[in-house]
Every structure is written in structure tokens, then in C-alpha cells.
Amino acid sequence: MSTSYRVAVLVGSLRKASYNRKLALALAQLAPAELQLQIVEIGDLPFYNEDDAAEPPAAWVKFREAVKGSDAVLFVSPEYNRSIPGALKNALDVGSRPYGHNAFDGKPAAVITLSPGALGGFGAHHHLRQVLACLNTPLLPSPEVYLGGAGEMFTAEGGIAKPETEAFLRKVMVAFASWVRKHKE
């Protein structure tokens, strides 16, 4: 019997046509069949405010349930000002609070950053890894994935334009599947 794993995909960019959203959709096509990638939207989450913890907004509840109901989490994000986008940081705060109810706790995860520049979101990648370590999220240690050249990354149909990049991303997703299996079996 084959096992299937639900992977919550958090995209750091809110733009509908963002490069990172395109990448997340492409990764869903490249992933091994055992990984079922589903984007969990973060754009409608009100800012985290502990004053709202007793009666959390419906969007917080829905988001927390989506993350808790997943077997793993994949983060696909751009870099804003050498760090992670505010919407993604807010999603991490919403999902990890209140204390003792961390939806990310123990979920195997991977981080992929994509930017137009040559550094491929290096700063965001490492800031996100630092936050996730605090949230007890076992991160895929290797390969670390920083992708530059976002403007030339995709075909008109949304696929990966360069065969060598597509082959690399397939290997990344195979490594992630192995990481998820290791932590879920």
C-alpha cells in the first residue's frame, strides 16, 4: 500500500502572478506522487494580536487547521529587504500561537527561495530557517535551495524553462519526500 502525504505550501508572496506562486504550482507537478502539495493561503490572515487569542478570527482558525491537518510544510518565498515577507512572518506567528498550540510543531519542512536577483533569496532563506528552528520544525538540511533569475524561470505555460533547473527541482522534491517519510514513519 502506498502512502500519501499532505503538504501545506506557504507562498511568501501575495501577488496572484508571483514568481513564487508559479514555482509552488510547478513543484506540485514535479513532486513524487506520494506528496500532495496544496497551497494554503496566507493573504487574508489578520495580523497576530494576542488580545484576539480568546476569540481568534475565523481566518486564523482555518489556517491553523490546514497546517495541523498536513503531514509536512513547504515554504516557497521571495526575499523582501534581506528577510522574509511580512505576510509570511505573520502566518508563522498565527500558526505557532498561542503558546503550547504550535500548528508547525514537529512538521517536517523544506524552504525554497526564489528572487529575480543572483542571490536567490539567501537572506530570506536563512531568516526563515532560524524562525522554523524555534518552532520545532525539522528542516530538510540539504539541498538548500536559493533560486535566482525568477524572470526567466518559467515557460509561458508555467513549467520550468531550463531542463537542468527542472531536473534539480525534481531531485529536491525527491529529497523532501524522503525527509517527510523519515519523520512520519
Image: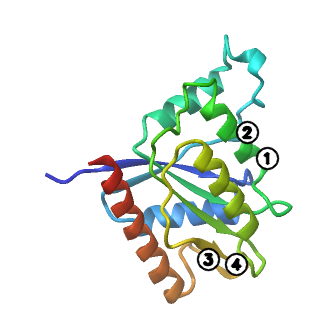
Q: Residue at x 45, y 44 (%)?
A: 107
Identify the residue position indicated by label 2 in the image: 90
Q: Regarding mark 2 in the picture, which secondary structure is present there?
A: helix
**Which disc number belongs to residue 154?**
3
Q: Residues within 10 Å of mark 2 (few under 14, many from 20)?
A: some
Q: Give the CA distance from mark 4 to mark 1.
A: 21 Å
Farthest-out residue, left: 1
Q: Give the CA distance from mark 2 to mark 4.
A: 25 Å
Image-based side of 126 in relation to 6, left or right: right
In the rendered structure, which amino acid carries the disc numbered 4? Gly
**Which disc number belongs to residue 148?**
4
Say if mark 2 contacts mark 1, CB within 8 Å.
yes
- Sequence-wise, which precedes: disc 4 or disc 1? 1
Q: Give the CA distance from mark 1 to mark 3.
A: 25 Å
In the rendered structure, which amino acid carries the disc numbered 2? Asn
- In the rendered view, tell whether residue 162 sits above or below residue 146: below
Q: Give the CA distance from mark 4 to mark 3.
A: 12 Å
Q: Give the CA distance from mark 2 to mark 3.
A: 28 Å
Instruction: Measuring from the top left, give residue 135's x and y in whole percent.
Output: 58, 41
- Sequence-wise, which precedes: disc 2 or disc 3? 2
Image-based side of 164 in relation to 13, left or right: left
Q: Give the CA distance from mark 2 to mark 1.
A: 6 Å
- In the rendered view, tell whether residue 26 sits above or below residue 63: below
Q: Regarding mark 3 in the picture, which secondary structure is present there?
A: loop
Identify the residue position indicated by label 1 in the image: 86
